[in-house]
Image (spheres, rainbow, N blue to C red):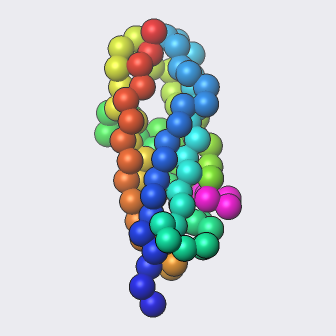
Amino acid sequence: MRKAKAQTAVKVVKKPTAGKSGSVRVTVTAKGSSVRAGGSYVVKVRGKVVAKGRLTNGTGTARLPKLAAGKHKVQVSYKGSPQVAKANRTITVTVR
């Protein structure tokens, strides 16, 4: 069985500020398929794992730690499932 290609989106739902945590929503869809993505994901900031979670109906929410002011790269790695291939997505979050 061929796995569906994963499309990953990451959106900041609570903007972090200097000294306060934030959160991101992870959404994974199976391109060209009606399959709901399931499985686990990992969120990293500066190469350090800051959150892990499992998707429910293709979505999950992860808390970002307190970050210093500036720009930070947030990388989300979706581990894949028996029906959906693994995928990665990186966004830049600006902390003021």
Q: With respect to residue 19, does 89 lie above or below?
A: below
Residue 37 visible to an observer of this rendering = yes
Q: Position of residue 15 (x, y in %)?
A: 56, 21
Q: Report the magenta residues as a range.
A: 54-58
Q: With respect to residue 61, does 56 lie above or below?
A: below
Q: Residue furthest front?
A: 32
> Image quadrant for the C terminus?
top left
* Image quadrant assignment for residue 86: bottom left
Asked whether 48 or 40 is in front, the reply is 40
Q: With respect to residue 95, does 76 lie above or below?
A: below
Relative to 35, 65 lies left or right: left
Q: With respect to residue 8, does 70 lie above or below?
A: above
71 magenta-colored: no
* Image quadrant assignment for residue 7: bottom left
Asked whether 54 or 27 is in front, the reply is 27
Identify which residue is drawn at 58% across, 41% down. 25
Asked whether 81 or 8 is in front, the reply is 8
Asked whether 73 or 48 is in front, the reply is 73
Q: Position of residue 41 (x, y in %)?
A: 50, 55
Q: Main secondary structure of the magenta part?
A: loop
Total count of labels: 0
Identify which residue is drawn at 36% across, 14% down. 70
55 magenta-colored: yes
Q: Residue furthest bottom?
A: 1
